[in-house]
Amino acid sequence: MERDLPPSLAVGGLGLMEFERLAALERELVARNIAVQPAQYRRAPGTVSESGAVVQGFAGHLFIADGGNLWEQQLVGGLGLTAEALGLWSRALRDRTTHAAELGVRIVQVVVPEKQIVLPGFRWLTDRAPDPSRRPLTAIRTAADGAILYPAEALRLHEPWCELFWRGNSHWCATGCIIVARAILAALMDAPPPLEPLVRLERAAFRHDLSTHFAEDVAIEEIIRIGEAGRRIFDTMMFAKTGHYGGSHYIIRNIDAPLRESLVIFGDSNACDMGLSAALSAVFTDVHFRWSKSVDWAYVEEMHARFVIWESAERFLITPPAED
């Protein structure tokens, strides 16, 4: 579970704290968390959780291994797409682009790189890193002919001085999320407003998703996360009801946003509770999030949205979407 820390610890927007300071603060917090919870960071690299879903890397980084989506088997080409699945992906990605154009809607289809792609040196010794070129994404990007935004390189360029991903988590931290949000806005519109001065940041206490796979690790760490820039005017409250975010649907309204437009996001945890929807709520008056692997065009039309994002973690690409 996560909880907010007292308001006195609020960080404020990036207009008050530059991106470079955020990056430095994230690394300061990592150093503090290592000092407070040293056992979490001393597990031998290569140690696999009892579930088999999580593997220990270097410097305390945990990685998704072969859980429900058999991600590392995908990564090395041991688990690929069938010809039928590749055809479904290609058709879905291209049809979305066509459908958006017919409606006068701008769409960005973004695949979020997994940690091993951006930070391979924290998973393997340099000379032992596998060749990831046979993973499903490679074939999908070729077949889809540019329909996917894949911000791996933008993330890698910041790796020398940004955390990008929390060490005990499969998800990006605030710096990683902001880098990807910038890339999305640049692809979504010709002249996007500057993101950084608008983003709301907050301190929180957090238990990371991958660290919970190790029974001895119950550490709750202090982090900086992206807060929502408005208020929720609709929320199915899935986490409160079920303990899981799957099926979530909410709307964030920010009456002070620079763009008087609605944005609809169809995605997973990266957008739902790990910052992307929150970051973009600083820019758009209404941000609608729907937990979905497909695009519901009827909903887009009903909400009179002119901007759409479809977002997916890379490991989920092994299963093609069921488009209508």
Image (tube, grey):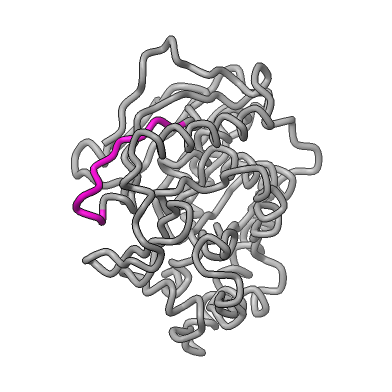
Report the side of 16 relative to 299 (left or right): right
Q: Residue at x 47, y 48 (%)?
A: 270
Q: Residue at x 75, y 36 (%)?
A: 192
Q: Residue at x 60, y 17 (%)?
A: 256
**Quarter residue 51 falls in:** bottom left
Tell me if residue 183 is in the magenta stretch: no
User: Where in the figure is residue 98, as x and y percent of width and height?
Assistant: 66, 64
Quarter of the image for the N terminus: give it: top left
Tell me if residue 219 is in the magenta stretch: yes
Residue nearest the viewer, comparing 24 with 318: 24
Instruction: Give the prevailing secondary structure in the magenta stretch.
Output: loop
User: Where in the figure is residue 46, as x and y percent of width and height?
Assistant: 38, 68
Q: Residue at x 33, y 66 (%)?
A: 47
Report the side of 234 relative to 270 (left or right): left
Residue 299 can be seen, yes or no: no
User: Where in the figure is residue 291, as x and y percent of width and height?
Assistant: 39, 50
Image: magenta residue range: 213-223
Report the side of 65 relative to 172 (left or right): left
User: Where in the figure is residue 193, as x and y percent of width and height?
Assistant: 74, 31
Quarter of the image for the C terminus: give it: bottom left
Residue nearest the viewer, comparing 91 with 270: 270
Residue 134 can be seen, yes or no: yes
**Quarter residue 3 falls in:** top left
Report the side of 322 relative to 146 (left or right): left
How many numbered circles are shown? 0
Query: Seen from this angle, which residue lies furthest top?
Result: 8
Q: Is residue 155 above or below residue 190?
A: below
Q: Is residue 78 above or below residue 160?
A: below
Query: Seen from this angle, which residue lies furthest bottom?
Result: 83
Q: Is residue 139 above or below residue 2?
A: below
